[in-house]
Amino acid sequence: MYLAKIYVTYKPSILDPQGEVIKAALKRMDYAGINQVAQGKYFEVKLEAKDVDTATAEVQSFTDALLINQNTETYRFDLSLVSDEVSI
Amino acid sequence: MKAAVISFPGSNCDFDMLYALQDFGVDAEIVSAKQNSLAEFDAIFLPGGFSYGDYLRTGAIARFSPIMSAVTQAANAGKLVVGICNGFQILTEAGLLPGQLLGNATTGFICDDIELSITNGQTAFTNSYESDEKIVIPVAHAEGNFFADEDTLNKLEENNQIVFRYVNNPNGSAHDIAGIMNEQGNVFGMMPHPERAVDEVLGNIDGQKFFKSMLSTILAKA
């Protein structure tokens, strides 16, 4: 079984109001060196696949179809082979 | 005219829309998102609310509910398909309308009466309004910031697909867009709630002509 760790972020050109609000709070908390905060989404998906290429294709397919909106979001992911017993 | 108001898990403006349609003598009924046929209806309404808890992204889960293939069929057949607020978000996620509704530019939920201008008064949704008429319609949303890339925005402008604009943009929407339609002019989405502005008792009837426009369009077709 494979474990996909998928990181979704806004494309750089997209305004991220939540990131901006968090940045302003961090500044108020005296973290003076903070330059940028981006808030994204993180998914862990376990899937059965016959090999790593098949798993990769499937992760790309369902991430494009549902997990992101391609108008504004982009993603990267890590894929690892895990045993059935290991919990994420 | 027979109209369907789709009820998704988490829809909360479905009955407001139903009552508004019935006020105009429309034979309207609530249809569950679990159904998969809309063959008997002339017009389909996707109401406001928080379908599927707005989990993942607004409209992202609703877009894959069983009823949506019937909604797409109805849209392709030229029937009127109208999304209000969360319904608009669902139609963009489904690709039946271009763009996406992002979080408001100033964080937070906006609940207010907002002035709109009629950008295109020659549509199935606005033909009872005067072009450039100003109306006030309630808004209630946290994700109403319309985004589309430059090419898409240019096409919307060139094809007169922008139907309503905000007079004072409350949420950061590109080109002050409050409502758009598809190129064919039968699929429409807007963030403000005209169904909340149809009855004297609520103190605002600026939404009445929205319903009158759709009725006259459908009666003209029949």
Image (tube, coloured by chain):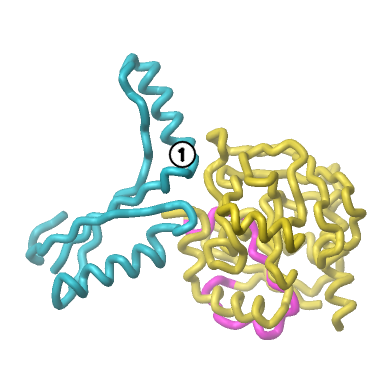
Q: Is residue B24 magenta?
A: no
The reply to whether residue B11 is visible in this rendering is: no
From the image, which quarter does the C terminus of chain A lie in? bottom left
Which shade is chain A?
cyan
Q: Nearer the viewer, residue B157 or A15?
A: B157
x and y, in percent, of residue A29 in the image: 35, 17
Q: Which residues are magenta?
A: B32-52
Chain shown in yellow = B
The reply to whether residue A5 is visible in this rendering is: yes
Q: Residue furthest top?
A: A30
Relative side of B81 to A15, left or right: right
Residue B107's place in the image compared with B54, above or below, is above
Q: Is residue B48 magenta?
A: yes
Q: Which residue lies under the disc numbered 1?
A: A16
Q: Main secondary structure of the magenta part?
A: loop
Residue B20's place in the image compared with B192, above or below, is below
